[in-house]
Amino acid sequence: MSVWKPTSVENEPSTRMVRYVIYRAYFDETKEEYSDHIVGYCYEGRVSSKIVEWDSEKRLATTRSGRKYHLTEGGVGVNMDALDVWGHWKYNNNVIEAIDVTEEYVKDDVNDSDF
């Protein structure tokens, strides 16, 4: 599978993410250095940059790049293209561990049947 950078933030300042999971990536063994990322589908499998702001009422994440991701209601779940990109992203960014923290963001949308 080919992996490429997404469209620039200037050309795509916001997008709607469907079939997503939010992962916390740890970069050191002490787990003191970490960041949260949306891994999902928006016309292609994608991994967001670090989430820096979260509006739970609007389901709106703003990332370090400045892009805004609107998370669709009922959209929690796995997308295989996104998981492929996530695997590359983790390798390229020296992630030592990643855990699913989706429920911390969208508590009302997560249930066992989605995974």
Image: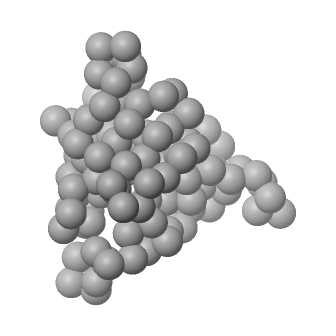
Seen from the viewer's position, the closer of residues 17 and 61 is 61
Q: Position of residue 72 (x, y in %)?
A: 21, 56
Q: Is residue 112 above or below residue 42?
A: below
Quadrant of the image containing the C terminus: bottom left
Q: Is residue 23 left or right of residue 3?
A: right
Report the residue at 49% width, 52% height from top.
Answer: 54
- The answer to whether residue 45 is left or right of residue 51 is left
Dividing the picture into quarters, in which one does residue 109 lie? Answer: bottom left
The answer to which image quadrant residue 64 occupies is top right
- Position in image of residue 1 (x %, y %): 26, 35
- The image quarter containing residue 9 is top left
Q: Position of residue 86 (x, y in %)?
A: 42, 47
Please say if 106 is above or below 32. Answer: below
Identify the residue at horizontal 76%, vertical 62% (top origin): 31
94 left or right of 58 in image: right
Instruction: Using residue 94 as the reference point, say whether residue 74 is left or right of it.
Output: left
* On screen, residue 74 above or below 110: above
The furthest residue to the front:
57
Observer-nearest of 94 and 18: 18
> How many discs mark residues in the rendered view?
0
Residue at screen point 43% across, 47% down: 61
Position of residue 97 measured from the top left corner of the image (x, y, whole percent): 62, 61
Q: Is residue 55 visible?
A: yes
Q: Is residue 90 visible in the rendered structure shown here?
A: no
The residue closer to the viewer here, 55 or 101, is 55
Q: Residue furthest bottom?
A: 112
Between 96 and 21, the one nearer to me in the picture: 21
